[in-house]
Amino acid sequence: MFTLPSGVSFFERGWLSSNNVLIQDDEQAILVDTGYWTHADQTAALVAATLKERPLTSIMNTHLHSDHCGGNAHLQGLYPALTTYIPPGHASFVDQWDVNVLTYEPTGQHCPRFTKSGVLRGGESFTVAGSTWRIHAAPGHDPHSIIIFNESDGILISADALWENGFGVVFPEIEGFAAFEEVKLTLAAIEQLKPRVVLPGHGSAFDDVDGALERARSRLAQFESAPDKHANYAAKVLLKFKLLELQKIKLVDYLGWGQSAQYLHLLHTTYSQGISFEAWFLDLCKALEKSGACLINDEYINNRN
Ligand SMILES: [Zn+2]
């Protein structure tokens, strides 16, 4: 088993919130990603329990999906001197708070408004406790995502570009932009870094990086040969995410939420035009139930872990 250097803490969260990494020395305490907004109190408690009386000095977001920056606003309220750094691609949309481009509207998710102090560009680095952490662009799952690599200790914060078993939904593909090739290039870039330990955006930390890359590549090959499989996976991820948030909801209200999520309409019209949106949505619910991800009874749908 691997150990992390002192000053690096990994908070593994449930799947609704992204994991968080706290990197600190005597002067700084930087939190990479802040989870989903409904868990903001939990995120703040994890940070406070580790830092004790010391303040959090910075937030860095690998990308701006709601499950990675949903705690930003809450933490900004708790620590007035906090600075917040985001990938450059969405910077102006954060300033304008464009919930469409930031995907909160089309995913049917929510993220409390926050402000940014600066951006994290590929190639730039920062130093904590004498260790260099370098930013690398990692498009694919999200065109603007970055990953952060600690060159001294071989620790990679991989966001949703690489998990122990797979990687995040390739969001540009939902919008009709080819991005599987970017996923492939990002996996190659990760391999080149030769990380010793990977701290992913979701799931456990791991050190069998070769195994994870192999699994990710085989999954990518499946998606490339059958994009409808990816579309089906993406739709189920969006549904399950909402269920994780709501836990229990009337099926009719759940469908109402689905009707409001633009990405679900895109997936439906692109891949499943033969059936109505309602029938397609209910088929997805049944598929989730079959896999043990939810339970449908009477007029309710319940999350199952
Ligand atoms: Zn993401």
Image (spheres, helix red, strand yellow):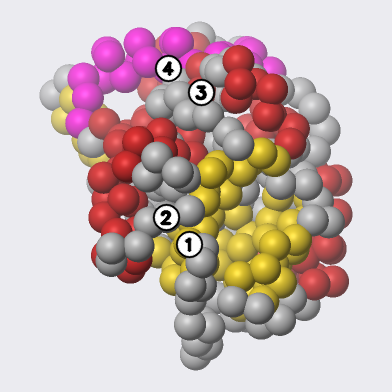
Question: What percent of the width, then of the height, locates residue 180?
Answer: 79, 43
Lower sequence index among marks 2 and 3: 2
Residue highlighted by disc 2: 56
| Marks 3 and 1, the one that precedes in the sequence | 1
Q: Nearer the viewer, mark 4 or mark 1?
A: 1
Q: Badges 3 and 4: C-beta atoms under 8 Å apart?
A: no
Sort mark 2 into few (<14), some (14-19) or many (20+) by Cα contacts within 10 Å.
many
Q: Mark 4 and 2 residues: CB-CB less than 8 Å, in contact?
A: no
Q: CA distance from mark 3 to mark 4?
A: 13 Å
Q: Rounded to the nearest whole Å, what is the CA distance between mark 4 and mark 1?
A: 39 Å
Q: CA distance from mark 2 to mark 3?
A: 26 Å
* Label 2 close to label 3 by CB (< 8 Å): no
Quarter-wise, where is residue 184 in the image? bottom right
| Towards the viewer: 4 or 237 | 4
Of label 4 and label 2, which has the lower sequence position? 2
Instruction: Please give the residue where the numbered disc 3 appears in the rendered image.
Output: 104
Q: Tell me the kind of residue under disc 4.
A: Gly
Element type at mark 3: helix
Q: Quadrant of residue 214?
A: bottom right
Residue under label 4, please give it: 258
For disc 3, the neighbor class at 10 Å (few under 14, some 14 to 19, many from 20) is some
Left/right placement of residue 251 relative to residue 61 reads left
Q: Nearer the viewer, mark 4 or mark 2?
A: 2
Q: Main secondary structure of the magenta part?
A: helix
Q: Magenta residues?
A: 248-273
Would you place residue 147 above or below residue 101 in this image? below
Mark in front: 3 vs 1 = 1
Where is 169 relative to 98, above or below?
Answer: below
274 relative to 30 in the view: left or right: right
* Residue at disc 2, secondary structure: loop
**Amino acid on which disc 2 is placed:** Leu
